[in-house]
Image: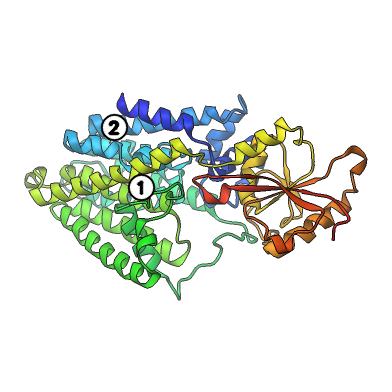
Amino acid sequence: MGYALVSLLLLWHHEPWRDEMQCWEIARRSASLSELFFNARYEGHPSAWYLLLFAITRFTPDFAAVQVLHWLLALASVALVLWRSPFSRWQKGLMVFGYFFLFEYGVLTRNYAIGVLLALALCSLAQDWKRHWLAMQVLLFCLLQCSLFAALVACAFFVPLFFVGIRGLRQNALAWQKIALGALIFLGGLLLSAFDMMPPADTNYAAAWKWSTPDWQPALGAFFRAMLPVPPLGKHGWGSHVLFQLLEWDQRVLVECTMSLVLLVCCLFSLRKSPFALAFFGLAWAAIGVFLAVKFPGFIRHHGHFYLAWVMALWVKPYFSGPSSHSESRGTNAFFTFILVLQVAAAVPLAYFDLKFPFSQSRAVADFLKQNHLEDRLLVGDYDYAASPVAFHLRRPIYYPNALKKGSFILWNKEQEALKITDIVPVALDLCQQHGDPDASGQALLLLTSYAIPAEHLVPSVHLIKTFAPAMEISEEYHLYEVRCGGG
């Protein structure tokens, strides 16, 4: 009950930001399933979440509907932790009020919550894995469809599970038909997920693979920040870490990499009595780390899958081990509790600042435009990804000059060409000329930026109307300008 009330309070006061809006807008503005898959093809995730949102948007355009769904998913995950996990009462309480379960996968409405629920449901069935063999394969199939990082976790879990099944076959504990069918279910889900996530040839977001020059520092730093996500105090602490403020870059790299290796050894040591749990976590750590190093360094929501994999490994550890592993050593128990305490310590300031400050100012911009009867003017937004949530609140597309077209959600393709701050005023003046000078009606073009245009680059016909700040997501603090023709 406590988690339900706290998470509902946070969700009620949370202003959704662009990543939450992007998925919703893709689903809302897709008229058919084929258009949905077409619009989501650059997202880098499987389509399960988009299909779910597509179904919801057929009944309501209100984003609160998916927030309620997300809240219910988070509650279901917490229920599994409280009633099915093998941890102590104190550890369960700390876990559900930790950073990832309360804030990142509880308040922020993304596809990761459904992956967390399925992963924990998988753990809850592992206690009687022989009986639930096929059900676990179905859960793995579904987990593969949730997100790219959930798919990596699913693959890491399947490998030792398959070998456990082979051992069960030799001991006449499982029939070969079950093992074969389970493997087919998993492989079918893997192929579907891989096909679904395959990016188009013109993708422009994290497009390159760096197999020859992997960058291990961000991957090691990501593991450290996932296990110890200590944000700096302040309204812009989300997605950052206190070390970013305390240390210079080279010092921070050294501390993060060293601490990551220490934490990795501690995590592996905590799983030493269970070859299954050890193999699963090791594979998950390697898969996520390699992906971060060779493809995309990711953000804290992605890094949290390191922590999720460790929790899962500790959960299933007693179910795939000898009797001696059922009682945790004092050191392992203390280390686990220490991590959980720091997770709660990370959640508290972020929850406080999300209650105190808007997470995004996009809703405030839209409300201002409506209240001042400006919502029908041509609105030019730069950067496009930062301005996109304003389009959602206005319920109409806005013009993105870097893509040379109107839109709401973002297509991460090569049509996008980033503008320099020095270019935006000439581009806005040119757009004003193209659309004609609306002086007869007393209107003018509006320019919305997620940065302040330097005074030396402004001209008399471009003036600031209002600044919208502060916001926890600093790129969604806005500056609204009026642009009239003839001011070049």
Residue that extends furthest to the left in the rendered view of this protein: 324
Q: Secondary structure at mark 2?
A: helix
> For mark 1, what is the residue?
183
Check disc 1 and give the amino acid type.
Ala
Residue 403: x percent and y percent? 72, 55
Check disc 2 and give the amino acid type.
Leu
The quarter of the rendered structure image containing the N terminus is top left
In which quarter of the view is residue 8 placed? top left
Q: Residue at x 55, y 36 (%)?
A: 51
Q: Residue at x 34, y 56 (%)?
A: 225
- Left or right? Give the position of 39 relative to 442: left
Q: Residue at x 51, y 39 (%)?
A: 358
> For mark 2, what is the residue?
80
Front-most of 271 and 354? Answer: 354
Residue 405: x percent and y percent? 76, 51
The quarter of the rendered structure image containing the C terminus is bottom right
